[in-house]
């Protein structure tokens, strides 16, 4: 009776060669193609430049004087105004996009945590809200220096278009879940809460539509609710698009 010999299992190579083989086998696959990495680098570097150039603007310019506002506070050119730049939603939204885009560009594998994708989603939604609100309500304010115009173009025009475009073309699909979208909404809610709590103490608000002394807390609350509702709608839009792109 013939017996079929069992194939011998090949032992893993030993020594330096074995270590190289195991290292190659265990090496994580990079998330996306080189073009994706380049796109993430660019879409991360531009908002980072926008955030960083906000500080010399604060050092060299007083906070904007808006006729007819009800608050009296403000910031003179210098360290106080420079360090106040993160109080603007524009700065926050660009910082979120910069951090998450550069993370995707530099990691060997794409993050999988709820926290990362909640921040990524919040950045995308926030920078889109920034572009819509600024260009429809605030466009036309003073832009008296080359650096100011450069910063304005990056943060309010380029990045609100580039960030969602790069997300749609290169981000891994299936990452915007209802849970993560809900966590993402916490970030603009915390910003609004901190802004409304800080405003009366320093008698200053970052945007004229948040002017509580002039418009009243109820009206400003309605405005904020509308902006947050728009943010939530954008989360739904991104989530739906994410599912459709993933189904292709």
Image (spheres, rainbow, N blue to C red):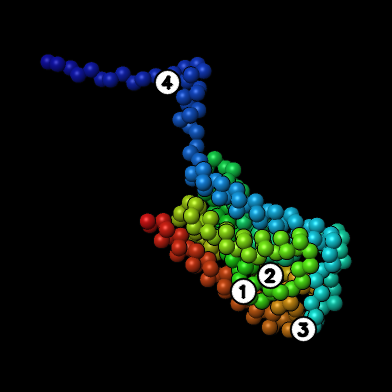
Please tell me which residue is depicted at 69% across the width and 80% down the height of the picture: 220
Q: Tell me whether circle 2 and circle 1 mark residues in contact (CB < 8 Å).
A: yes
Quadrant of residue 226 in the image? bottom right
Residue 131 against residue 166 in the figure, above or below: below
Nearer the N terminus, badge 4 or badge 3? 4
Quadrant of residue 230 in the image? bottom right
- The number of callouts visible is 4
State how far apart marks 2 and 1 are (Cα): 10 Å
Nearer the N terminus, badge 3 or badge 2? 2
Q: Tell me whether circle 3 and circle 2 mark residues in contact (CB < 8 Å).
A: no
State how far apart marks 4 and 3 are (Cα): 75 Å
Q: Nearer the viewer, mark 4 or mark 3?
A: 3
Neighbor class of circle 3 (other Cα within 10 Å; few <14, some 14-19, many 20+) is some
Residue 162, position in %: x, y? 57, 59
Residue 48 against residue 214 in the figure, above or below: above
Q: Report the front residue among 244 and 48.
A: 48
Residue 42, position in %: x, y? 60, 51
Outermost residue to the front: 146
Please tell me which residue is depicted at 57% across the width and 50% down the height of the picture: 40
Residue under numbered circle 4: 12
Residue under numbered circle 3: 214
Helix, strand or loop status at disc 4: loop
State how far apart marks 3 and 2 are (Cα): 18 Å
Residue under numbered circle 2: 192
């Amino acid at each position: 009776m013939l017996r079929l010999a069992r194939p011998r299992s090949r032992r893993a190579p030993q020594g330096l060669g074995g270590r190289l083989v195991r290292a190659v086998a265990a090496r994580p696959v990079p998330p996306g193609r080189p073009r994706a990495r380049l796109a993430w680098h660019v879409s991360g570097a531009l908002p980072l430049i926008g955030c960083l150039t906000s500080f010399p603007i604060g050092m060299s310019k007083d906070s904007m004087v808006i006729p007819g506002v009800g608050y009296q506070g403000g910031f003179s050119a210098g360290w106080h105004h420079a360090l106040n730049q993160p109080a603007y939603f524009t700065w926050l939204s660009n910082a979120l996009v910069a951090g998450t885009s550069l993370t995707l560009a530099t990691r060997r594998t794409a993050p999988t945590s709820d926290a990362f994708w909640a921040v990524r989603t919040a950045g995308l939604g926030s920078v889109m809200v920034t572009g819509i609100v600024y260009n429809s309500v605030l466009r036309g304010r003073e832009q008296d220096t080359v650096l100011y115009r450069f910063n304005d173009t990056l943060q309010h025009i380029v990045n609100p278009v580039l960030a969602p475009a790069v997300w749609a073309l290169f981000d891994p699909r299936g990452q915007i879940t209802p849970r993560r979208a809900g966590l993402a909404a916490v970030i603009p809610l915390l910003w609004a809460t901190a802004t409304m709590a800080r405003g009366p103490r320093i008698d200053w608000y970052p945007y004229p539509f948040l002017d509580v002394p002039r418009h009243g807390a109820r009206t400003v609350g309605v405005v904020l609710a509308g902006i947050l509702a728009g943010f939530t709608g954008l989360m739904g839009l991104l989530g739906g698009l994410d599912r459709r792109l993933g189904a292709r």
